[in-house]
Amino acid sequence: MDNARTRTAVVTGASSGIGEATALRLAGEGFDVVLGARRLDKLEEVARRCGGRALQLDVTDPASISEFTAAVEKADVLVNNAGLAVGLTPLDSIPDEELIVMWETNVLGLARVTREFVPKLESSGNGHIVNLGSTAAHETYPGGGGYTASKHAVRAITQTLRLELLGRPIRVTMVSPGLVETEFSMVRFGGDRDRATKPYEGIQPLVAEDIADCIAWAVTRPPHVNIDEIIVRPRAQATSTKVARSS
Ligand code: NDP
Ligand code: 8X3
């Protein structure tokens, strides 16, 4: 079995939110961390704090994925975290641009990064893929069609990987959070702070560190233990649309 101190964890979307918290936490657990995202300045700052390596990555660009993968010598853990939602437009009027960016990032990006890293994960002898799903991988809500469908696809990919990698030394886990206060809603609503704060009003949402905690727990189980999925919500959230808010 690998010594956790020498294992390398690759975290996509590590320039903010859950990815940033995960990079910091896994470094604290003794992993060498490789961080990928588009905003190199933010990424480098996180990398400095965790003693990791920042490499620019755009998961919607196959050439960027190839360059990123080639620069990473070994990988024991891959956290496919890069992802986003754009808008809350109903499906009968959603513009192609919104559908395309969500699907290229959340689905095609995740599938391509995974495909490129499987050989390195396998040769580590104890590989682990952690995909960021969402409660939106299990539920739908009005206006969320583009995003929820993409996260349902992440769930299908995760389950398929577990079948296809069976018998090879790679675990596959999905972590599916409910409301986590990060830059997610600012991105979703194009920087409109009023709309972006609404989902978290009157509740104590999860924070990025809560999700990093789940990821760290899953990847530090003994190699024979595969955590299939962790669904984690704030106590005040029962479903995507049922939230107990204080007035
Ligand atoms: P943030 O917006 O804070 O972080 C998203 C990260 O993804 C950023 O580091 C961003 O970096 C990166 N990213 C976005 N597009 C790309 C791209 N094309 N290539 C590389 N990196 C990219 O949001 P969260 O931390 O909340 O989101 C992380 C994951 O968690 C996502 O997959 C999201 O769907 C999922 N999730 C979030 C929930 C929430 O309530 N916040 C709940 C359930 C799941 P950069 O812009 O620098 O490229
Ligand atoms: C993000 C959570 O409820 O906005 O995955 O879909 S939600």
Image: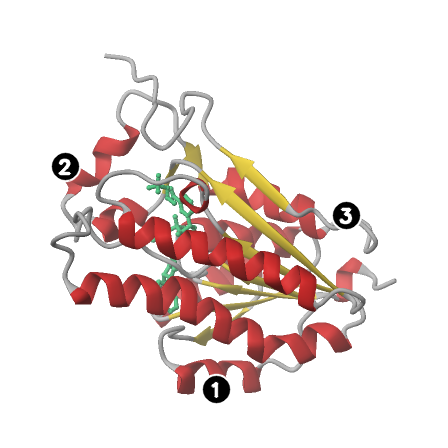
Classify residue 183 as left or right of residue 59: left
Q: Position of residue 6 (x, y in %)?
A: 76, 66
Please state which amino acid type lies under the numbered disc 1. Answer: Glu
Q: Residue at x 69, y 52 (%)?
A: 219
Classify residue 88 as left or right of residue 117: left
Looking at the rendered structure, the secondary structure element under dot 3 is loop
The span from disc 3 to disc 2 (Cα, nearest Å) is 41 Å
The span from disc 3 to disc 1 (Cα, nearest Å) is 31 Å
Looking at the rendered structure, the secondary structure element under dot 2 is helix
Please state which amino acid type lies under the numbered disc 2. Answer: Asp
Q: Which mark is residue 194?
A: 2
Residue 74 appearing in the image: no
Looking at the rendered structure, the secondary structure element under dot 1 is helix
Q: Quadrant of residue 41?
A: bottom left
Judge by depth and name the residue closer to the eye, 106 or 179.
106
Seen in the picture, residue 70 relative to 164 is either above or below; the reply is below
- Name the residue at the right extreme: 1
